[in-house]
Structure formats: C-alpha cells, structure tokens
Amino acid sequence: MSFKVFAISSRGGAGYDVPLHLKLGTEFLVILTGLMTFLSLLAAIANLSLGHMTHAWTSGLENTLTIEIPAPNVSEESVSKLLDGLRKISGVEEAKLLSQKDMQDLLSPWLGDAGSIWDDLPVPKLVTVSFSERTPQLIKDISATTRKIIPDARVDAHEDWLADLMKLAHGLKLTALAVFILIMMVTAVVIAGAVRSRMAIHHRELELLHIMGASDRYITGQFVRYILMQSLKGSSLGAVAGLAVAGFFLFLARRNPGTVPELTLQGAEWLVFAAVPCLLIVIGLVSARITSLRVLGEMP
Amino acid sequence: MIKFEHVGLRYGIGPEVLSDISFTLAPGSFHFLCGPSGAGKTSLMSLLYLGRRPTRGMVEAFGHNTNLLDRVALSEERRKIGVVFQDFRLLPHMSAFDNVALPLRINDVPEKKIKDHVEELLDWVGLGDSMHRLPPTLSGGQQQRIAVARAVITNPRLLLADEPTGNLDDEIGMKLMGLFEQLNKMGTTIVIATHSLQILERLPHPRLILES
C-alpha cells in the first residue's frame, strides 16, 4: 500500500500530472476553508465556554436552597429551632440566617438606603441552607422539618428557574454543536463540488491518464494532494484569525469585566485551535477522495 | 494476443457504431487499420486500448476476457499498451521529459531509472537537447516524436497509432513508419490506423478494413 500524496516531485505544474496548479476557479477553496475554520473555531469555543459557564452557575446554586420566613408571625426562638433542626439533617452542611445587614445589602438597590424604611417594612427573614449533594430525599427532609417548625415558611430550592437556565444553556450548547456540524457538512459538500468541477475541466487529461493505465488511486492522489494544499493554507489562516479574535475577547473580558462573554477555555481545551483545523482538513480530504473515486468510477 | 469476437459498440442509446467485429492479432504482428471516414476506426482503437468496454461480444487481451476484468485489473492491462494519438495529446504544462516519463511514473518506476530511460529514449528520437522544453514550444514533428517516445517508453506489448502521419509531411511520416518497423522487429505488436495510400502501398502489412 503506497500513498503518493506527500511525494515531492521535480515535475512541472507543481508536481501534478493533471494541471491543478492552474487557477481555474477553485482558488476560492483557500478562502472557504479559512472562513469555515474560523467559524467552526468560534462554534467550538462557544460550546466549550457554555459548558464551563453552566457548570459555574449550577455549582453555585445547585447545592443551596433558601427558606423564606414571613416576618410578623415568627419569633426568634422558632427561627433558632429551625436552624438547629436543619443542621441535624444528614447531608446539610450549613444553615444560616441572613442578618439585617445582609438583607439591607440585598434589597437596597430596589428600596434605597433610607434607614427608617427597614423598621416599617415587613421584610421576611431568609435562611440559606447549603449541602454536599442535592437529592430529592434531602429536599423533602428540609421541607418537612421547615413545615413542622414554621408552617408558614416557604422552601425555595431554585428548581424552577435553575431548570430554565439549564435548558437555555443546553439549547445554546446544542445550537453551537449543530452549527459546528453544519459547517463541516458544508465544507465537505463544497469541496466535493470543487473536485467535480476540476475533474470536468480536466476531463481530457484524466482520460489520457486512464488510457495509460493510471489507477483510480493514482489519479485520486493528485486531487487529494491539491485539496490538502488548499485546505492547509485556508485552515492556517482561519486558525490564526480565530486565535486573534479569541485573544481580543480575552483581552476585552479581562480589561472590562462584564462587557463581553468571558472565554473560559481550560488547559488542553486550547488544543481546539489545532484540532478543529485538522478535523476540517481531514473532512476535506475524505470528501475529495470519495468524490474523485466516484467520478473516476463513471469511466470504463 | 488480442482477439475480438462479434464485438459491437454503441454510445449511450445511439445506434451501433461498430457491429459484429471479429479478428485476432498474433503477437509480433503489424497491421494497418483502414476504412472510410466515419467507419469507426477511432472507436475500434478505443476498444483496442481498453478505453471502452464493448456493448456486446468479447474482447480478449493478453489472455484475459476484458469483460470479466475489474477496474484495477483492466488498468493493469492498459499499461501493456502504448498509444500514439492523432492529436498527440501531450500535457502542455509538462516538459518533454515529464511527458515521456509519465507512463513510467504511473508504473511506479524509481526516479533514477526514469531519468536514465527517458534521456536515452529522447536522444534516440533526436530530442535529447529539447527535453526540458514545453510541448507548445516544439514543432509538430517534435511533438509527434515525443508522443511516440511516450507510447514506447514502457516497452509495450501492443502499440496503437491513430493516423500518426496525419500532421506530418511525407518525409517525416515515412521516417516515423520506419521507427514503427524497428519496434515491430523488436517484438512489439503494432496496429496503425491510417488512410494514407502512400503508406499502405509502401508497407506490405496485412490490413484490417472497416466498412461503413
């Protein structure tokens, strides 16, 4: 089994028997693969970053819940009893009543800092409970303990809005993945079209090679090498552009936190800048090979 | 070596351009293929160089029924055949050297051997000092000789030439025929499609005659 794809030849025409070095309308492949590499890099980075963001959100909220206690009806003693009861539940790491100051900090953006208002307003008390692992049984135990000690208290396990947030994040991740796959498919289809077009242009040369006894693999090797060279150029440009944009976003995010989404690639995930262009090149080569073999298969 | 039995050929759903062709070419033989224009000489040549499969009948080449050969085996059989086309069909982007070297590269011959063989052959056809020139910069006669060199570089068992003297003056045409005679004496089976009466009268080889 021999592959001549990487063979260096002293032949004219950049080493091609078929004059693929001539500019006959398929040079756009460099721009196309560059653009596709750039877009697929963005999609891949978006996918990875969204994964980190959802992890960060959920790890902050997933293992906590809040208990709201309507203010007028509850004594300090009942609250202390509730805190003790919660702390005794297996799995609960901490149960803490938010202080008056914490409440003021939370509500001041809406109510302002006027001191007297806090004495007049029936602000509920809030208890935050943190635990090691969220299980349905633990939430049930906390709710039961709360109901038993303070029947009017409401347990907010953040389940509803956390679920919505997770749905949104997963939807965005799936969209990024779908865009990534779509880009790969479009690349394969366009490269197949370009190969077909060049094979039609060079039909006479192909027929000559065929008559001389060139195997389908020999001829296909030339087209695969042509696509490899075009894709290498394009993907390199796309990867450089992707790195530049990622670097720019990273710079902006660090300089002005909150203005742009933070790029949160970690460790080996930076290899995406090498893996995505390589994947795109491989897809291009496979597409070129399949197309070329199919077209040659139409010859006798 | 080559055997046609009741061979027919049609293009697509058109009428048969060749009907009921039967003949045998013995190894080392020399034949002229004659017939009026439109009789199907070029089509018959394409069957001989295995560029097409017959739509009916059987073509046997080098002991194999070509109808039964797969694509890989058929391409291997094609490598035993050299073809000189009427319009030369040289690749204009490749030098004379590379054009002649092409069949050897297809046969996966090492570059060192290719260099020696091609240079020797180009010297033999009198183009030793033009081997790095591109075909469009060469005269018709020079291009013809490159086409012949390319056809014989692999020492084919069968050499086919389609109107090889059509673009040449009489003197160069007869020189070229002398070259074919030499190759035939060295054991190559030769079929030349021509309607040149001068050649047919001077060279007393058997004729395959196609009737329209």
Image (cartoon, coloured by chain):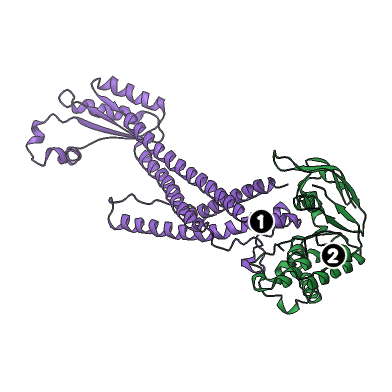
Chain colours: A purple, B green
Reply above or below: A252 against A293: below
Label 2: how many Cα within 10 Å (few below 14, some 14–19, many 20+): some
Does B105 sit left or right of A16 as displayed?
right
Does B89 sit left or right of A146 as displayed?
right
The extreme bottom residue here reads: B129
Label 1: how many Cα within 10 Å (few below 14, some 14–19, many 20+): some
Question: Is residue A157 visible from the viewing direction of this image?
Answer: no
- Residue ID for mark 2: B199
Q: Residue at x 55, y 48 (%)?
A: A193
Reply above or below: B68 against B107: above
Residue type for callout 2: Ile
Q: Which mark is residue B12?
A: none
Q: Residue at x 6, y 37 (%)?
A: A116
Residue closer to the observer: B10 or A172: B10
| Residue B126 spot, x, y in % from top left | 78, 77
Residue closer to the observer: A150 or A121: A121
Q: How many circles with numbers are drawn on the protein?
A: 2
Does A203 sit left or right of B178 as displayed?
left
Dot 2: what SS?
A: helix
Reply above or below: A123 against A300: above
- Residue ID for mark 1: A204
Residue closer to the observer: A158 or A296: A296
Question: Is residue A195 visible from the viewing direction of this image?
Answer: yes
Chain ID for label 2?
A: B
Dot 1: what SS?
A: helix
Q: Are marks 2 and 1 on the same chain?
A: no
C-alpha span from label 2 to label 1: 30 Å
Residue type for callout 1: Arg
Q: Residue at x 48, y 43 (%)?
A: A182
2 or 1: mark nearer the eye: 2
| Residue B142 spot, x, y in % from top left | 73, 72
